[in-house]
Image (tube, rainbow, N blue to C red):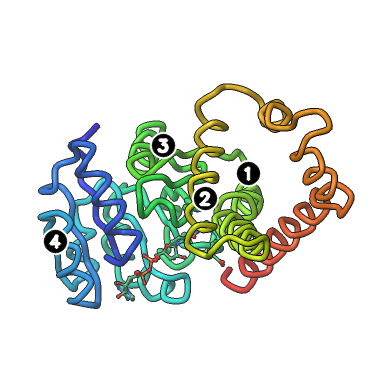
Amino acid sequence: MSDFSIAFIGAGNMASSIIGGLTASGHRAASIHAADVSTESLEHLTRVAPVTTGTDNAAAASGADVIILAVKPQVMAEVCASIAPVVAESDALILTIAAGVPIASYQRWLHTAAPVVRCMPNTPSLLGSGASGLFASPEVSSLQRERAQAIMDAVGTSVWVEEEQQLHAVTAVSGSGPAYFFLFMESMVNAGERLGLDRDTATALVQQTCLGAARMALESGVPLDELRQRVTSPKGTTERAIASFEAQGLRELVHNALTACSARSEELSNELG
Ligand SMILES: NC(=O)C1=CN([C@@H]2O[C@H](COP(=O)(O)OP(=O)(O)OC[C@H]3O[C@@H](n4cnc5c(N)ncnc54)[C@H](O)[C@@H]3O)[C@@H](O)[C@H]2O)C=CC1
Ligand SMILES: O=C(O)[C@@H]1CCC=N1
């Protein structure tokens, strides 16, 4: 599994994180090639791992088993045009991490029904703690699915969805999700300050509480509602806070926010499609 060759088109933040994760998990740097228009991005990447780099997208993609498209959605059409002649001559898997661009657009820009896996990652991938949703076009083989999963598992965990449309929900839950937790943490820090803590103390307590709660949710095997109830002593302090959240409609607020996010993801797909 670790010997297949990978070409990255775009060598920015996400590409260097994935490459860092891949090489840390045993993938040979010699079988990874990266192309970028920016020599600065390429220089930064070679400090992460000794991969082959260049500014010619088609040269990097040539001979690769997996071509990872790690550029912004706005330049995707141009990038696909640059590699289309190579893709036409190969059976490489196209793995794209760009938000919003539908599979039909890649196949149109590449002028072929290439096997495409769309991935919606999130920013904690930069630390190896990402959560990614994956969707495969019908042309993707089982070996290619395994390879796509192995690549994204190098920077966190990944789940497959059965329908491309479900990537809108993945975007609403995990793609944009880190921002919701940051907002909640900001709100807790501000509340802690107003209750008399200095900002640094409130920040340290909030950060560690968030990490601890996430680890309990992940590692205890106990359902979320039970974990919450274990903190909530009858007639105690937590009960008052939870009652306040519930009375002010926190669950409905969250539902509305994720619905708005998913709807925007659909709008963007229509614009980029
Ligand atoms: N769901 C999320 O929160 C996240 C999604 N993403 C997606 O991942 C993709 C990459 O994001 P980042 O790595 O953060 O962006 P970045 O801006 O760090 O890297 C993109 C790279 O593409 C290069 N590039 C631009 N035009 C090019 C061309 N024609 N040929 C070759 N390279 C070219 C740029 O020079 C740059 O180095 C984006 O599509 C983004 O939407 C990334 C991070 C998180
Ligand atoms: O906000 C956005 O549009 C992108 C997609 C998911 C996370 N960031």
Marks 2 and 1, the one that precedes in the sequence: 1
3D distance between C-alphas at marks 2 and 3: 41 Å
3D distance between C-alphas at marks 3 and 1: 15 Å
Marks 2 and 4, the one that precedes in the sequence: 4
3D distance between C-alphas at marks 2 and 4: 34 Å
Q: Secondary structure at mark 2?
A: helix
Q: Amino acid at mark 3?
A: Arg
Q: Residue at x 78, y 52 (%)?
A: 255
Q: Residue at x 36, y 55 (%)?
A: 126
Q: Amino acid at mark 1?
A: Glu
Which quarter of the frame holds ligand 1?
bottom left
Please report contact status of discs 4 and 3: CB closer than 8 Å, yes or no: no
Marks 3 and 1, the one that precedes in the sequence: 3
* Residue on which disc 3 sits: 145
Count all numbered tags in the image, as a single digit.
4
Give the numbered dot on residue 47. 4
Mark 4 vs mark 1, foreground winner is 4
Dot 1 surroundings within 10 Å: few (below 14), some, or many (20 or more)?
Answer: few
* Residue on which disc 1 sits: 163
Query: On screen, 48 above or below 134?
Result: below
Q: Position of residue 85 (x, y in %)?
A: 29, 65
* Residue on which disc 2 sits: 205
Q: Residue at x 14, y 61 (%)?
A: 47
Please report contact status of discs 2 and 3: CB closer than 8 Å, yes or no: no
Q: Secondary structure at mark 1?
A: loop
Query: On screen, 55 above or below 167?
Result: below
3D distance between C-alphas at marks 4 and 3: 29 Å
Q: Quadrant of the C terminus?
A: bottom right
Q: In which image quadrant can residue 143 be found?
A: top left
